[in-house]
Image (cartoon, grey):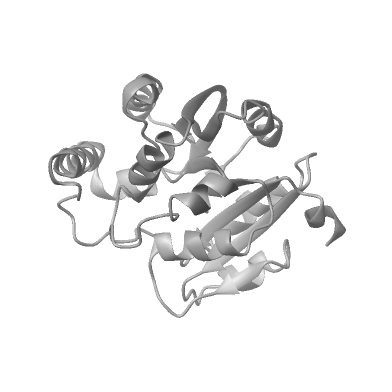
Amino acid sequence: MPREKRAKISVIIPTYKEGRYIENILSQLVRVNNPLEIIVVDSGSRDGTVETARRFTGNVYQLNERGISKARNYGAQRASGEILVFMDADVEPPIDFADKVLAAFRDRRVVGATCNIMPAEPRPSENAFFKFYNLLLRLFTVFRPHSRGEFLAVRRKEFIKVGGFNEDLPCLEDHDLALRLSRLGRFIFINGLTVYETMRRIRRLGLLNVVKMWTINYLFFMLRGRPVAETWHAVR
């Protein structure tokens, strides 16, 4: 596609049974004014995810094995953009997100970035929690960068240099990547950018349970370099 060949940004979306959500994010991405290379890497969906994705981009790949880090790394290996933006399939980015990413990466010292991540159609407790959580993310970028896979932008050259995502980690692979990237340059928080995510995991498991799970895994990662969780179950 001519539009994709000119792209400075490659958006990489790993999928597994995302038939309910994939059309929403892809229909938003193709409306972005800046040219994007859109890459979808699917890990065995049988719900129409792949067929839907192919209506929006010619860069749809299928893997025979599961693993979100495997899918992201696979997509990154096939990306041509200078900047790689990893998003989950149930995220809704604003129409001007590419402008804000490009503006942030004009500083050559910047090697990675995250942004505000807020719930779509939030309940009051969810809204309050994520406002607090985003504040923590902004503070962490000063001394211990943290990111979530809902939105993670990286400079391709440095991503390759650090070896991409650690495929042995069942979770916190995004945080691990942010830490390793920060040794090569600045990992920043884009204050003026917000993406919206569904609350499917939180509403299935409960907000307190998810926060508890995040906290335990993060503490174990800090102490021993690996979360306590051995697997990460998809919630669909």
Image coordinates for residue 180, horizontal then vertical, percent:
37, 42
Query: Is 175 on the left-hand or right-hand side of 61?
Result: left
Q: Quadrant of residue 122?
A: top left
Query: Is 146 on the left-hand or right-hand side of 212?
Result: right
Image coordinates for residue 204, horizontal then vertical, percent:
29, 50
Q: Quadrant of the N terminus?
A: bottom right
Query: Is 35 on the left-hand or right-hand side of 85?
Result: right
Q: Quadrant of residue 220?
A: top left
Image coordinates for residue 69, horizontal then vertical, percent:
41, 60
Foreground pick, 116 / 46: 116
Residue, x 63% and y 33% (percent of image)?
A: 101
Inspect this view and state whether residue 132 appears: no
Image coordinates for residue 218, horizontal then vertical, percent:
21, 40
Foreground pick, 156 / 118: 156
Q: Quadrant of residue 235?
A: bottom left
Farthest residue to the right: give it.
Answer: 2
Query: Is 210 on the left-hand or right-hand side of 152?
Result: left
Inspect this view and state whether residue 101 appears: yes
Residue, x 49% and y 76% (percent of image)?
A: 63
Residue, x 41% and y 55% (percent of image)?
A: 165
Residue, x 49% and y 61% (percent of image)?
A: 73
**How many numbered marks, from 0 up?**
0
Q: Quadrant of the C terminus?
A: bottom left
